[in-house]
Image (cartoon, grey):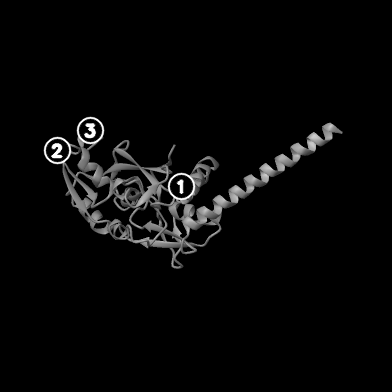
Amino acid sequence: MIRSLSAMAALVVLSAVMLGGARAAEFELMEARAQLTPTGKLRVAFMLENQALVSGQSESGEVRGLAGDLARAIAERAGVPLQPRVYSTRGTFEVSLGRGEWDLEFNTRDPRYASYVDFSPSFVNVDQVYLVPPGKTLKEMTEVDRKGVRVAAIANSDAEGLLFGFIKEAQILRVSQDPEPTIRLLKTGAVEAFAGSAEYLSGIAAQLPGSRFLPGRFAAVPAAIGVARGRPAALAFVNQFLAEAKTSGLIQRAIEGAHLHGVSVAP
């Protein structure tokens, strides 16, 4: 009888603990949802210029690619509707900083944005590589930073920022995101190499027969989710989502589904 009472008491305590844990988890979800969606919808900023994360946008407004897949999964987990906020360039996105237009943003981990967002852990790394146009003789990355070598990079891109950090002898030429003038530039032989993300340059290479990539990468740029600053419960929710998305293979499947080049799951 005493043993039965002891077992019953233990069961009551266990049930109370489990109930308390369930209530705590429910409260955490409610708090996270409130911080994630102050307008009732999850407003996510996407930058079309970042082709490693955003493959494009459908006529219905759905964002395609790695970032779009992850954003939809976050919204589904939170049980809220997704509202994309699409910016064509880095410049137009930067105008939105601090204006309350979005709740989350998918981007490379740029320290200039730290005053406006709290970053999640990195979820992918994006390889930065060199594309050599037809007729040019560069064979190794060590040959790039030499006098007389001209290297093109998209203005305000991650690649351009990196180049200015370590290129000392070569000349850096800033070009637009538009592939047509870029391809014309490469065809004329005006540059010895083009620096950029492997994903973007793979599209250029496909339109430029005889072009080739130098072996390896000169950098791997981490990408993260930026949560509008001052929302700790929302940040914790996103961090937990990404941790599970890595271990479950969700991020890897999204990379493969988008057929991305030079993009890998971050450790």
Q: Distance between the residues labelled 1 and 2?
A: 36 Å
Q: Where is residue 57, by image quadrant?
A: bottom left
Q: Residue 142 carries which label?
A: 3
Q: Mark 2 points at which residue?
A: 169
Foreground: disc 3 or disc 1? 1
Q: What residue type is labelled 1?
A: Ile
Earlier along the polypeptide chain: callout 1 or callout 2?
2
Q: Residue at x 42, y 42 (%)?
A: 121
Front position in the image: 205 or 43: 43
Position of residue 85 measured from the top left corner of the image (x, y, whole percent): 40, 62
Is there CB contact under 8 Å for labels 1 and 2? no
Q: Which residue is drawn at 55% across and 55% down?
A: 30
Q: Which amino acid does label 2 sit on?
A: Glu
Q: Residue 255 carries which label?
A: 1
Front position in the image: 30 or 121: 30
SS at mark 3 in the image = helix
Is the C terminus in the top left, top right, bottom left or bottom right quadrant? top left
